[in-house]
Amino acid sequence: MTAMPRNRTAQASGVGDAELIAHLARGEMTALGQLYDRYDGDVRRLIARLGVRDGDVDDLVQATFLDALKSAARFDGRESAKPWLLGIAVMLVRRHRRSVARLAARIAAWAAEPFRTNARTPEELAERTQDADRAQRALESLSPKKREAFVLVVLEGMTGEAAARALGIPAPTVGTRVHHARKEIREFLQLDGQQRRGSEP
Amino acid sequence: MNAQKCPRVWEAEAIEDGRLVDADRASYERHAAACAECRRELAVLGEMRATMGCAPAPVRTPLQRRAERAAILRRANGAYMHDDAPRARRRLSFALAVPLLVLLGFAGRGRLARRHLDVALGRAASSAAPTPRFEVLDARGAVWSTAIDGAVSRVSLRAGVASFHVEQVAPGRRFLVALPDGELEVRGTRFVVDVEGGSTRSVEVTEGLVALRLTGETELLLRAGERWSVAGSAAAGWTSTPPSATTSSQPTTALALPLAPTSATRATSTTSIGAPDGAPSTTGSSARGPASRASERYAEAIGAYRAGAYARADALFAAFVLDFPGDPSCEDAAFLRAICHQRMGDDAGAATLARAYLTRYPAGLRRPEATRIATPPGP
């Protein structure tokens, strides 16, 4: 019976996140570099798991840190900057998703084929391992809201309160979304397992 | 789905999400030890987390991370250098200029407007500098200097790892990176060079094409995605080549470079350097001794800075500048002193040091940030 680690604060140096972001709020580029060194992997992983296409992930990672620079003065001084940064990333992904959806609507109006933002090339599909593929398809089966809550709480190990702050919604709502996401993923994985067993010779 | 019989099975999710703590957690753990259904639920949730944890996450190479970090800092610096006020003024000017030009055209004065435009375009064309634009970023302890010699722009990299971004080089011009044991010629590209102990350790090209010419070796052409590195010690020379690197028929050339350190800034100077191509390299152990001591002292100061010991770091940086006044790292040391004071809450001291930095390095890499520190915020 093990619980996920909560809000681990990766401190490579003696300077804490709150102090680092205070420096950032004063316009220190050095602090921005240090913040990137600490959290670029977390931000990139989250953005990818929220369903952003590979080609757009880089732009959103950069936008997240640039936005952090602008928003540093509003940082609430909590111990770890990770939930705050991931919250910025989620907002940017939502904005990106809306712009992609608008583009998709325009393209769909021009062409008969529906536009699939998560369409993969055959090369990408071939590269995935089976488990990674199942997990990715399970994530893609969720609605954006449930997916955000599930990724932050279950995959990133954030508390419900931290995820709620990041998403700008009440903590009980996060719990409800995670619960329903789990239920849907469980059904998806069960169905997928049955189909795989059925297809085996 | 199976009907749930145990009334406490919902707590499995709560404990999984960290919502159960202290006595509640202990209570549920005792219960689960005796309840098969809760144990099964916990196992399913754990298995789901493990499966979903396999969802692919993008992996970046250190080189890609460095490039992205540099891009973020460059964009952030750019944002500071082009603040909203001037942009708003430009927008206002443009908004006023367009109707004015339209009015001029309709009033039969189109010729006058065109003449004004022609003059403006002519100025823009004549001010387009033929010198290639480039950027050198210190990836790890890089020691470099820049110079322009006629049509040749040259960056001398003597030690450390530096990341280069060179925009397209105009015809008739050359861009060279002089190395202790050879040189690189580029035509508009991004690449990273690692120099250690007076010899080139590796070259990695991410965009464009680079010609690597090491002393006594034939030229290698490295394309985007290719990497050359020397295996084993520097004395081993060419012991490895990139898988698809091609050898050109051009003769090997070498550069003799002055080893006196100069300011490591992005700006170019007009100092004429070097002997004609073909001269032997002058790299020697006598030049590496002081550089090594300087590197150690600088590393010590950086260590204090990263540990948050700003007073000590400030003292170490100050001593470093006094003891090694010609070392290229003096620019960073001078800038970081200002940061140390800023982080200690001494804004006035930080501003004084930032102004000193700007005076000493008017075209320094840290100019945007130093300008901000030197300028106190308005009321």
Image (tube, helix red, strand yellow):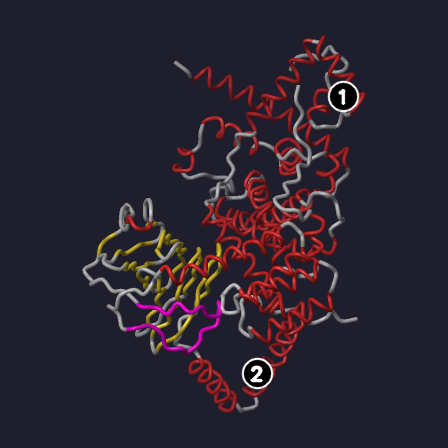
Q: Is residue A9 above or below residue B257?
A: above
- Is B73 on the left-hand or right-hand side of A71? left
Along the line of sight, the residue nearer the viewer: B133 or B56: B133
In x, y percent, where is residue B70? 52, 57
Determine the residue positioned at 32% across, 58% down: B209
Q: Secondary structure at mark 2?
A: helix
Q: Quadrant of residue A25?
A: bottom right
Along the line of sight, the residue nearer the viewer: B323 or B279: B323
Q: Badge 2 is on which residue?
A: B102
Q: Secondary structure at mark 1?
A: helix
In x, y percent, where is residue B378? 76, 71
On what subunit does the disc labeled 1 rest? Answer: B
Q: Badge 1 is on which residue?
A: B25
Q: Find out whether residue B265 is within the magenta segment.
A: yes
Q: From the image, which quarter does the C terminus of chain B lie in?
A: bottom right
Disc 2 and disc 1: Cα gap in Å?
75 Å
In x, y percent, where is residue B51? 55, 25
Determine the residue positioned at 69% across, 62% down: B341
Q: Is residue B254 above or below residue B275?
A: above
Q: Is residue B287 above or below residue A118?
A: below
Q: From the image, which quarter does the N terminus of chain B lie in?
A: top right
